Image: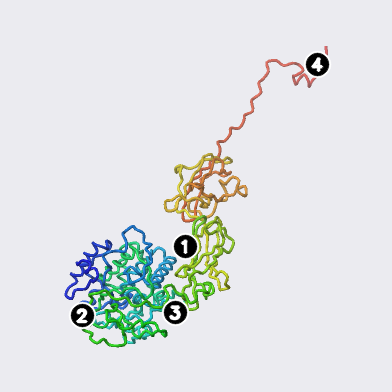
Amino acid sequence: MAAQLGRRLRKGATSGAVVAAAVAALAASQAPEMVPPPTDNAGGDRAIGTGETTTPPSDGSATGDSPYFTELPPLNTPNKPGASTNLPVITGPAEAGIPASVLAAYKRAEASVRSTDPDCNLPWQLLAGIGKVESGQARGGRVDANGTTLSPILGPALNGVGFANISDTDGGAYDGDKVHDRAVGPMQFIPSTWATWGQDANGDGKKDPNNIYDAAQAAGLYLCANDRNLALKADLDRAVLSYNRSTEYLNTVLSWFEYYKRGTHQVPDGTGVLPVDRSDTRGRGNRPTYTPPYSPLPTTPAPTTSAPKPESPDPKPSEPGVSPRPTQPTTDPSKPPTPTTPPTPTTPPTKPTDPPTTDPTVPPAVKVARLAPVATGALTATTGNAFAKAPTVAALDAVGTPVTGVSIRFDIVGTTDARFAGGRTTATVTTGSSGLAASPALRAGEKTGSFTVRATVVNRTLAAVEFGATVTARQADTLTRLDGDAALPATTGTAFTQQLRVKATVKGVLAPGVLVTGSVVTSKTATDASTEGPYFKGAEGATARTKVFTTDADGLITLAAGDLLAGDKAGTYFLKLTAPGGGTVFVELTVTAPEPTPEPTTPEPTPSTSESPTDSPEATSSPSPSN
């Protein structure tokens, strides 16, 4: 009974209480982080309730609160928590299998969004959960080699009857409806939202909501809007609810998200399994029940070969949500298919799993028409540290399809000592199944400035893709004096005899190799170095009052005794130490004049008691009287 409930979760026709109870039960058994519906149920459920006339605004969600699949994943998850998620490739209609092109699109979108918005922490499994609920992974991976659905995937007219009321915004360009908007494509964007968030992720020059690569990247960017961090539960919930404002939708997406996080594998395009239960086929009150709108509008062109027709009628139930004869009315719409046996998988399309493979004898490099940058924007790092992201490119053929097995050469160009892993200035990387190649880890040297990383196709003369890179000085947001706050004393004409040590940290972590500038200033508010007073020993010029220090391996700078001279002008000065990143500290310097030296005194002459006649002035000035 629990397994059946896990396979078909339906909204009750009379109340949401049954749904809440079912979701809570399943959450406890298989999705521990699933969110129970809030008591006020302020999401989109109210807009589709019996007799509800209030509809959400046109910008309330990416999908216009269109219908969606509500079936939860099996209670038996692909593997146990903590076990390896590198499951073997299994073909066939397995629930954990994701069609190859669809899976590649999700992973490419994750890589692209993480390169431009790493703080969002977008996981591709979240895109897979939304893609499963919105369109059954593009109707089981029925896409062409370029990733475009074989026929349009359209939601119902958003005319206010059971759904939002959104008048036409695209002139029918995407949805074929010039009266009302409809949700479009495998990720079910309404045209007005696509006009803002649409992307050209496969490089074919078009932003197509029916292309799984374009739609997946647009969905990733939409989920990351408003500076969300999807690693936080609250932001994750808000992101999913912004896509479709329904608490049942939230819980269904999160249950698939958890399921795919436990493990998944790739299956060939066209062999994925559709969920069976939709939120728009319930017959609730005055809400219309109609043929699922996600069936293709035009008939898929039949193959010209003698292969069996892919959409031929089958006496067994076909996959839910895909009408075997989209242009022909059913004989009895009121008689639903009997779900007593699982759906018979349709014959896989003749299209290969990994696009493109036209002629295996043609070297992959020959198939490439151009390289497209994936990790865009400038690359930055501080001296001696690794760059946060690696330059990444996609190798595409003439129609924008990713090409596997292409050798991409990355070169460091310019005056720099930045290097790839192993101290190399060049590296060659081969594109993977999604056509992507990322350079090896790039690390800055000790030289600041700008340089370029250039990506080219080996043995081809195609235009290169260049990424600008910049190396800035290491930073320290805090400088701390280690020997107290007392002023350093000295007398004019001598040197300061106390050692000075200052520690540099960034976000609480020691910061080695940081350039710290020391300047002698007259006050803490002065902007220029002093023209008199203390100066640095050995600096260029006898009275240099500015010097640059580099923190050692422990994040310290040290001024030994005698490194700072007092100068010849007494007074109070400050040694201002500043570091890139905002760290600043002031050290007071007190210069005093030396104690005055007493002047020497001249002694008074001492009179003699007897004088010789020859020493007497009178004896020398007048002759002796004669006798």
Q: CA distance from mark 3 to mark 4?
A: 139 Å
Label located before the other in sequence (2 or 4): 2
Q: Dot 4 surroundings within 10 Å: few (below 14), some, or many (20 or more)? A: few
Label located before the other in sequence (1 or 2): 2
Label located before the other in sequence (4 or 1): 1
Q: Secondary structure at mark 1?
A: loop
Q: Secondary structure at mark 3?
A: loop
Q: Compared with residue 228, is residue 348 higher up or lower down, i.e. above or below?
A: below
Toward the top, the furthest residue is: 627
- Res. 214 visible in picture: yes
Residue at which label 4 appears: 624
Residue at which label 2 appears: 283
Q: Residue 61's spot in the image, x, y percent?
A: 31, 74
User: Type of residue at label 4?
Assistant: Ser
Q: Compared with residue 578, is residue 67 higher up or lower down, i.e. above or below?
A: below
Q: Residue 145's spot in the image, x, y percent?
A: 43, 77
User: Type of residue at label 3?
Assistant: Lys
Label located before the other in sequence (3 or 4): 3
Q: Residue 106's spot in the image, x, y percent?
A: 39, 70
Question: Residue shown at 43%/51% (left/top)?
Answer: 509
In the image, which disc is placed on residue 389?
Answer: 1
Residue at which label 3 appears: 206
Question: Foreground: 412 or 142?
Answer: 142
- Res. 165 visible in picture: no
- Give the mark toward the camera: 4 or 1: 1
Q: CA distance from mark 3 to mark 1?
A: 27 Å
- Give the mark toward the camera: 2 or 4: 2
Toward the right, the furthest residue is: 626
Question: Foreground: 232 or 262?
Answer: 262
Label located before the other in sequence (2 or 3): 3
